[in-house]
Amino acid sequence: MPAIFPSDITLPASLEAPPDLDALPDRLYRIVAPWAARQPDALALHDAQTALSYAQLDRAIRDTAARLAEAGIRGGDRVLLVGENGVALALAILALGALDAWACPVNARLSAREIGSIREHAGARRVLCFGAGSPEAAAHAAAMGAADADWPWLGRFSLGPLDEACRPEPVSASSAEQVAALIYTSGTSGDPKGVMLTHRNLLFIGDNGRRLRRLVPQDGVYGVLPLSHVYGLSALLVAALHSGAALRLVPRFAPDALARALAEEGVTVLHGVPAMYARLLGWGRQAGTTLRAPQLRIAQLGGAPMTQPLKDDFERAFGLPLHNGYGLTESAPSISQTRLDAPRRDCSVGPPIPGVAVRIVDAEGQDAAAGAVGELWVRGPNVMKGYYRNPELTRATVTAEGWLKTGDLARQEEDGALFIVGRCKELIIRSGFNVYPVEVEQAINAHPQVVQSAVVGRSVDANEEVVAFVEAAAGSGLTAEALAAHLRERLAPYKLPAEIVFLEQLPASATGKILKNALKERAAASTRR
């Protein structure tokens, strides 16, 4: 493999010590001003229509905050931002933080029902819809009675009516108490869960990302992960701007566009979910194109489990490590990451990031034996303030001592590396044996004609059975019989799927996260027994 860093990039010192919390700014938007003074003309944010230097971004934040205040936005107000990645959305998030208002970004590809439910639960003072290039955002704006607006810096967007009934939440000078973003977790049923993330939560993760990934002003970051998801918000937007780097915001993933950007447009840092990397590699094979990324130095995966075949395929194609990480919305999101100076050959999510403590807890709530599987608990400055308007769920999820119960099953090796086994609620008990869906998915995804898969349990005759949903490569002709034969060589009989269902595309959220609840409902409704 080539050197991890190109010679023309100046690196900060490698820092395993946790960030100095007292040295961090007290608000997200303040990460911009130092770079506006140091490198005013350097590119900060850009999309297909707009580019802002650091000096322009600094001024734009202040001007937009003033406009929002004139529009009736106060500290403690929740403001719904409907759109897809772009400079305007990023600017609105930062400007709202300058007013101590809460940014509540949601992806325009959500349904009207989902957005309406979030709007009601958040008690949004106003809704801003950014519809450039997004028919869905325009449709939401029309449905909510938003009027056309055209502001300096933000450009054309839609401004919803003022909700006079909205009551602001208390404002705190403490970055650890003042909420910066209200992020709603993905799901297919149940009441909305709004995760309150403070300025300190997001700054802590952004600073860890800067340090662990050694981000520098020379970096060009490809930002296709939605800013409405905490991964895009903290690990892309906050980390990039905190580093003086240039963040390119891309509204939707397209493998050909990413391949071109990697080959020709100076991308040095790439973040993505497994499906994104799988489709990029699949596009390269189908198009007969040799994928190139001459300036790429960091490729980071998160958001869903990484498989060994995907990691191996990427590293063969690009000649550099595919790094892994793990987190969740409630931890802003990072909990662990593999290290640049110690790339791994396996699918570990790496050791905990500096400043974060972890425990592996058994069913009785006690620390599990070394190397044993148990629920992962996390404590640190990344842990959310709580669930908005749901103190009962907050108390059930975060202990009085500050431990966040992730709901994920994990084990930790002697070197500190974590391995995520699956979700507690997704554990399948087949004839008394534990079946971890991730293990079955790893075996399925090892087949060269599989893009991705999802495994769920189905209740049957006082037992559970394994059901696999598979997205095969286009034109592969892969059959259930051939895949079953592949799995019999790799899995114990009780782990084998009772049914294999091929889908043209697995249902997924805007971030690429597979919606397993939808698949569980489909499996349960199946008449096959």
Image (spheres, helix red, strand yellow):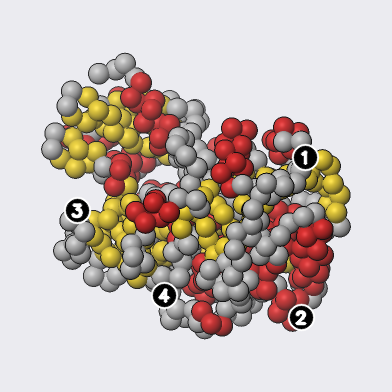
Nearer to us: label 1 or label 2: 1
User: Which circle marks residue 355 in the picture?
Assistant: 4
The quadrant in which the C terminus is found is top left
User: Which circle marks residue 335 in the picture?
Assistant: none
Q: Amino acid at mark 3?
A: Ala
Residue 3 at x, y = what percent? 51, 72
Mark 4 and 1 residues: CB-CB less than 8 Å, in contact? no
Q: Secondary structure at mark 1?
A: loop
**Residue 236 seen anywhere in this rendered image of the structure:** no
Q: Which residue is found at the position 77% from the left and 39% from the top? A: 146
Mark 1 and 2 residues: CB-CB less than 8 Å, in contact? no
Residue 431 falls in which quadrant of the image? top left
Q: Amino acid at mark 2?
A: Ala
Relative side of 506 to 179, left or right: left
Mark 3 and mark 2: span between their CA atoms? 53 Å
User: Which circle marks residue 37 in the picture?
Assistant: 2
Q: Earlier in the sequence, mark 4 or mark 1?
A: 1
Residue ID for mark 3: 363
Mark 1 and mark 2: span between their CA atoms? 37 Å
**Residue furthest out toward the left:** 432
User: Which circle marks residue 146 in the picture?
Assistant: 1
Residue 523 falls in which quadrant of the image? top left
Residue 427 at x, y = what percent? 26, 42
Nearer to us: label 4 or label 1: 1
Badge 4, how many Cα within 10 Å: few under 14, some, many 20+? Answer: some
Relative side of 261 to 426, left or right: right
Badge 2, how many Cα within 10 Å: few under 14, some, many 20+? Answer: few
Q: Secondary structure at mark 3?
A: loop
Mark 3 and 4 residues: CB-CB less than 8 Å, in contact? no
Q: Which residue is found at the position 62% from the left and 42% from the top? A: 119
